[in-house]
Image (spheres, coloured by chain):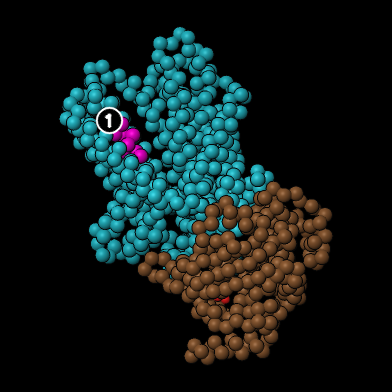
Amino acid sequence: MKIMANKVTKVMGNKGNQIEILHGIDLQTSSGEFLSIIGPSGSGKTTLLKCLSGLVQPTSGTVKIDNQLLNNISERKIAKLRRTKISYIFQSYNLLPALSAFDNIVLPLRLSRQRINKTKIYQLMNSLNFKADLKQLPAELSGGEQQKVAIARALTMKAEIIFADEPTGALDSTSRQIIFDQLRQLADSGVCIVMVTHDIGQAAQTDRALVLNDGQVMAEVNHPTEPLLISAMNETKKAII
Amino acid sequence: MIRLGLLQFKSSIKMWLTGIFVFIVYGWLISFCLTGAVTLEKELSSQQNNPLPIFVMPMFFGGITLFFVISNVIKTIVNELSDEYRMWMFLGADSRQISIIIAVQLSLVGFIGSCLGYIVMLFSIDSIYNTLQNFIGKVWLPEVNFKIIPMLFVIVNLLSIMICFLSGVLNSKKILKIRSTGKYFKLIIQVVVSVGFIVSSVKIILISSRTESGRSLFLVLFWMILFQIYLGQDLIKILAKIGRLLLPENCGSTGNLAIQQTSVNASKIRDDLIPIIVVQTIIYGLIELLFGLSDPNNMDMKNIVVSFIIYVDAPLIIVIANTVSVAMLKQPEQYENFGQLSRIGFTRGMLIHERSEEILFNSCLLFIVSLISNIFLYFIVRDHLINAFNTMIIIDLPLMVSGLIFVVLVVMETCNILIWYDKNLNKNKIEL
Ligand SMILES: Nc1ncnc2c1ncn2[C@@H]1O[C@H](COP(=O)(O)OP(=O)(O)OP(=O)(O)O)[C@@H](O)[C@H]1O
Ligand SMILES: [Mg+2]
């Protein structure tokens, strides 16, 4: 699975008060690549992730996933893509409050009428070190447990691309590490992951990092390390001044 | 899919039950009509006047009205839970699956509503039948004994579930804006409706005989209602803008706010006004047809009452019940607004004042649009109207309808505000 974005721009706001948030972003990923996007608050990271994943339409430019153009894709096709290939993990509000943890995990399977292997899911949750009851509703789970459920959902549907927006932002350092390690393992097993993060330490463990500022890619760091990223961030700051 | 719908219902049951009023009313209406029709049918052989349409037609027209106005209830609930429904889509539910989820929930509300409506009917059928008897006479409605018919209970529920499910499936796609291609489609409909409306109006002006113009008036009425449904929103929008411009620059602190609120809430208000305007127009059209265009010598008062019962009572009841349901559903949103306003120092009295002004503005809109419709209907057949036709009704009817809506909404809002302040003052006390 590949993502190809070409000159993506996004204009937001209502009539008379419109601002361009993304200014022509080009981007490519290959399967099994773990890409991180870093940048200051308000630089357009979330917006970019939404455009890449087809949650919102870019104002101009094109996004392709697996050679399939997301602009003007039919509602039926994007739905199919979402329940078979793409998975999202947001900072919070990842789960349907009406469904139990278990039902949330298997929802993509249910929506595409696939068989559900209950024991396999219980095993998976054990391996994720998930201690709570799968019959509980999301509101009764801690933030970390909720993120684990979201990851389990991506794992069970065998997602080929995972879009994650600060997936560990609200968590303590232990849970943060567990979740991040899971994502890292997934990437190593061939899943393409695009993750927005504020955590330079995490970004340094990904395959490639993009530094975003004011809706533009200011730097691209292959095999990033913390010092490399910090200097890249500082350079963009200097460039602006 | 159905199980998922049930789970979704369980978690948002409070919201759905808040909007249940219109479903109870519809359940009550069809159980009343069905019980009446079945009971009377047994007595029918000796009758010269067939009373069955009095019971069967309201069921039919009420059902159609419900089918359309439900979209308002769905829209309000889905808006309230829009994050949740967006999440369903992000996880790959397609529009068909989401509309089934919504339709399942709606059917459940319809089911609960019709059960309650049936019970209410059991207690009210005798007194309502007696009232009807007084109006129409025992020739039409003979003395009968109403019994509980278990089969009818099942049929009532099935009917209600069916309408809710269908309406849920068909309306939710539109509401979730899953189809954005609708723009041209809407434009085409608007053009067709406008052309039909204009052609039928021109035709009726050219007609010279009274009986013929009576028949054509039906056609004009039909096109006019479609015109109101498809173009009314845009026209009210323009009217509201003009209205806001005409108001004096400074209307006092609450007045200014009320005017701003009407412009913020404009689209919601427009949705609520249209069904009322449509029913008002039907009533006026019928009055014109029955009093203005039929021969005064063989005009039968009872026939006229029967016509009204057949054509307008059910839509009127459903539309008003729907207004109440939607107003109740909007409470959480209202409470948020109350909270903001009270934090910047609005007292209870000022809030009630402000809300009443807002409702007054909208009731005036309702009045003006109804008045314009009636004047139009009056002028196209003016030459054929018989002398006895009371022209005052052109103004009286909109005045009554908008007055009624004004009173109902102001009472509801006042209760709302009082309850809200009560709750929140108590909260503060505990905190202290
Ligand atoms: N719906 C919207 N309407 C108007 N402007 C918006 C909208 N959503 C976001 N913005 C603006 O777009 C810019 C980028 O927002 P975005 O959420 O992408 O930033 P971000 O990089 O994800 O920030 P953070 O790190 O704080 O999450 C911000 O300046 C924000 O104010
Ligand atoms: Mg963000």
Q: Is residue B12 left or right of residue B383?
A: right
Residue drawn 45% across and 73% down? Answer: A20
The amino acid type, in three-letter code, at marker 1 is Leu
Percent of width and height locating residue B200: 26, 34
**Magenta stretch in the rendered image:** B219-227
SS under mark 1? helix
Quadrant (top left/top right/bottom left/bottom right) for the N terminus of chain B: top right
Task: Please tell me whether residue B265 belongs to the stretch shown in magenta.
Answer: no
| Residue tagged 1 | B217
Q: Of all residues shown, which one is farthest toward the top?
A: B46
Percent of width and height locating residue B128: 46, 27
Residue B256 visible: yes
* Chain coloured cyan: B
Say above or below: A196 vs B192. Answer: below
Q: Of all residues shown, which one is farthest toward the front?
A: A67
Residue B351 vs residue B199, the one in the foreground:
B199
Residue drawn 59% across and 22% down? Answer: B149
Q: Quadrant of residue B218?
A: top left
Residue B165 vs residue A228, the one in the foreground:
A228
Kindly identify which chain the residue marked by label 1 belongs to: B
Say above or below: B64 vs B339. Answer: above
Asked if the residue at label 1 sits under 8 Å from ligand 1, the reply is no
Q: Is residue B104 left or right of residue B322?
A: right
Say above or below: A53 vs A212. Answer: above
Residue drawn 44% across and 26% down? Answer: B57
Percent of width and height locating residue B5: 63, 46
Say above or below: B242 vs A47. Answer: above
* Chain coloured brown: A
Residue drawn 56% across and 34% down? Answer: B162
